[in-house]
Image (tube, rainbow, N blue to C red):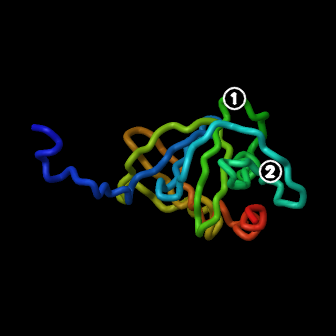
Amino acid sequence: MSFEDDDMYDDDVNTDNIYLTFSIEKEEYALYVHNVIEIVKLQKIIPVPDVVEYITGVINLRGKVIPVMDIRKRFKLPTVEYSDRTIIIVLEFENVFTGIAVDKVNDVIEILPANIQPPSQYSNDNGVVKGMGKKDEKALIILDISFLLNSKKNFAELQK
């Protein structure tokens, strides 16, 4: 049977449960794929004064100025020097574009709501962790974009 003959394959692909996964050190994180605009290799980051400490600067992506967040600094993890393996995931939230520097992009996967548990009882209310997801034998930390990018006004100012 070909895909064209099967009614379940159509142009309207449902991405409601689709996540992009990436790694920082040995931990694996997931972001809702609807917020992911692009994945780019590390490029020249221009430092910007007077921004929050986890914004390393901005990149020029085809004429658009994109602030870059060091996810390690955002999570208060030990920092490492960027290398040619560092990846920038460009996200969009409420019409503001932000890049996040990560160690490695892993995969695009489906995580069904039944496989997502709420954040730990010890997490901050309204924190960056939206939940803990399970896919096969993997445990993933699902991030809440709205809280990850909670300095929206700072990012918007950089894009003017």
Q: Nearer the viewer, residue 20 or 97?
A: 97
| Disc on res. 16 | none
Above or below, 157 against 102 in this view is: below
Question: What residue would you read off at disc 2?
Answer: 57
The residue type indicated by label 2 comes to Gly
Which is more N-terminal, label 2 or label 1? 2
Outermost residue toward the right in this view: 49
Locate the C terminus by quadrant.
bottom right
Q: On the picture, is 157 further left or further right than 142? A: right
Question: What residue would you read off at disc 1?
Answer: 84
On the image, the x and y values in percent for residue 157 come to 77, 67
On the image, the x and y values in percent for residue 71 come to 69, 48
Locate the N terminus by quadrant.
top left
On the image, the x and y values in percent for residue 112 come to 35, 55
Q: Residues within 10 Å of mark 1 (few under 14, many from 20)?
A: few
Outermost residue toward the front in this view: 63
- Secondary element under disc 2, as helix, strand or loop, is strand
Q: On the picture, is 2 further left or further right than 60? A: left
Q: Looking at the image, how many numbered discs can be counted on the residues?
A: 2
Q: Which residue is painted at 69% across and 52% down in the image?
A: 63
Q: Which residue is painted at 77% across and 35% down in the image?
A: 80
Q: Which residue is painted at 74% across and 70% down in the image?
A: 153
Q: Nearer the viewer, residue 138 or 10?
A: 10
The residue type indicated by label 1 comes to Asp
Q: Quadrant of residue 101?
A: top right
Q: CA distance from mark 1 to mark 2?
A: 17 Å
